[in-house]
């Protein structure tokens, strides 16, 4: 199901400030070199994430799901000079590509990439984060939520991508559809956070820890 008509998506993108030259190159290369380039958040959501980092004044960001590094670099561009972004992924090849792009930007030194299953990486991370972005395998969304919420400071934000999963959440049947639908139910009832679900792109949940 098409959630937002493509013409409206294009209109929104045309009326969004252009990303940096490097982000544009990163996206072009992602489309040239990877099989599912649509996994990258792209121009509008990338800018949205950068603005969330800037508006919230986040200094320490955790990302679950690096891919070729578009969202990580977008958020790093919004971080203060001394800010840090930790991002994890299991895919060696796309993580290497991400690192290659980041190395071309002065913002890249803010990013630390950790290779391995996120559920093994998260318990090893110390200290609190100001913002967490969840964008990895859908069946583990709830596990990522539970593992990252204790690592978020009070007043911090969790941002979750693909929460509408192409509209399939209305009638979930397949494994990932059911996982996302169950995740959305659990998050809406979670007393530890205040939540707003946005119909941007494939659906983005913003949750603020109380
Ligand atoms: C939708 S993509 C992330 C897109 C990225 N945020 C961006 O905007 O470019 C999802 C990523 O999750 C990673 N992933 C899948 N299972 C994972 C796991 N168990 N632990 C960590 N990362 C995982 C995949 O390798 C993939 O790169």
Image: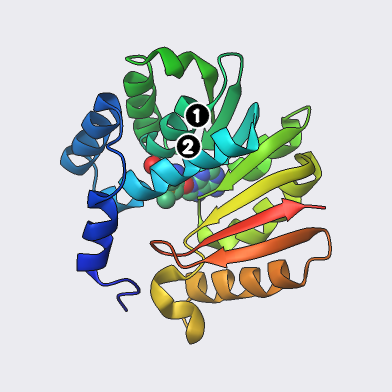
Q: Can you tell which mark lies on residue 134?
A: none
Tell me if 39 is positioned left or right of 85 in this view.
left
Q: Residues within 10 Å of mark 2 (few under 14, many from 20)?
A: many
Tell me if 10 is positioned left or right of 77 in this view.
left
Disc nearer the start of the sequence (2/1): 2
Question: Is residue 183 visible in this depiction of the protein?
Answer: yes
Q: What residue is rendered at 77% in x and 58% in y?
A: 193
Q: Which residue is mark 1?
A: 78
Label 2 beta carbon less than 8 Å to ligand 1? no
Q: Please state the horizontal and vertical placement of residue 108, each as a whole percent of the image.
A: 44, 18
Mark pair 2, 1: CA separation: 5 Å
Image-quadrant location for residue 141: bottom right
Image-quadrant location for residue 98: top left
Q: Please state the horizontal and vertical placement of residue 82, each as a whole percent of the image.
A: 61, 14
Q: How many marks?
A: 2
Image-quadrant location for residue 30: top left
Tell me if 81 is positioned left or right of 20 in this view.
right
Q: Please state the horizontal and vertical placement of residue 130, each as a whole percent of the image.
A: 70, 36
Q: Please state the horizontal and vertical placement of residue 206, each as a whole percent of the image.
A: 61, 56
Q: Can you tell which mark lies on residue 50?
A: 2
Q: How is the image coloured?
A: rainbow
Most extreme residue toward the front, as rendered?
A: 15
Q: Give the secondary structure at mark 2.
A: helix
Q: What residue is rendered at 23% in x and 59% in y?
A: 11
For the N terminus, give its image quadrant. bottom left
Q: Are marks 2 and 1 in contact (CB under 8 Å)?
A: yes
Q: What residue is rendered at 25% in x and 38% in y?
A: 27
């Amino acid at each position: 199901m098409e959630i937002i008509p493509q013409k409206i998506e294009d209109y929104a993108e045309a009326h969004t400030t252009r990303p940096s030259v490097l982000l544009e190159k990163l996206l072009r290369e992602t489309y040239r070199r990877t099989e599912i380039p649509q996994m990258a958040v792209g121009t509008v959501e990338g800018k949205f994430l950068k603005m969330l980092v800037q508006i919230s004044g986040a200094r320490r960001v955790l990302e679950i799901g690096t891919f070729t590094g578009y969202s990580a670099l977008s958020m790093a561009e919004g971080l203060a000079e001394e800010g840090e972004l930790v991002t994890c992924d299991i895919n060696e090849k796309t993580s290497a590509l991400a690192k290659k792009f980041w190395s071309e930007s002065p913002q890249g030194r803010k990013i630390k990439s950790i290779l391995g299953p996120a559920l093994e990486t998260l318990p090893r991370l110390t200290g609190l984060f100001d913002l967490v972005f969840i964008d990895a395998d859908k069946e583990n969304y709830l596990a990522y939520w539970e593992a990252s919420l204790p690592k978020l400071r009070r007043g911090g934000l969790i941002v979750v991508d693909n929460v509408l999963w192409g509209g399939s959440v209305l009638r979930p049947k397949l494994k990932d559809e059911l996982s996302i639908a169950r995740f959305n139910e659990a998050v809406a009832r979670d007393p530890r956070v205040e939540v707003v679900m946005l119909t941007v792109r494939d659906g983005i949940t913003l949750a603020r820890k109380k």
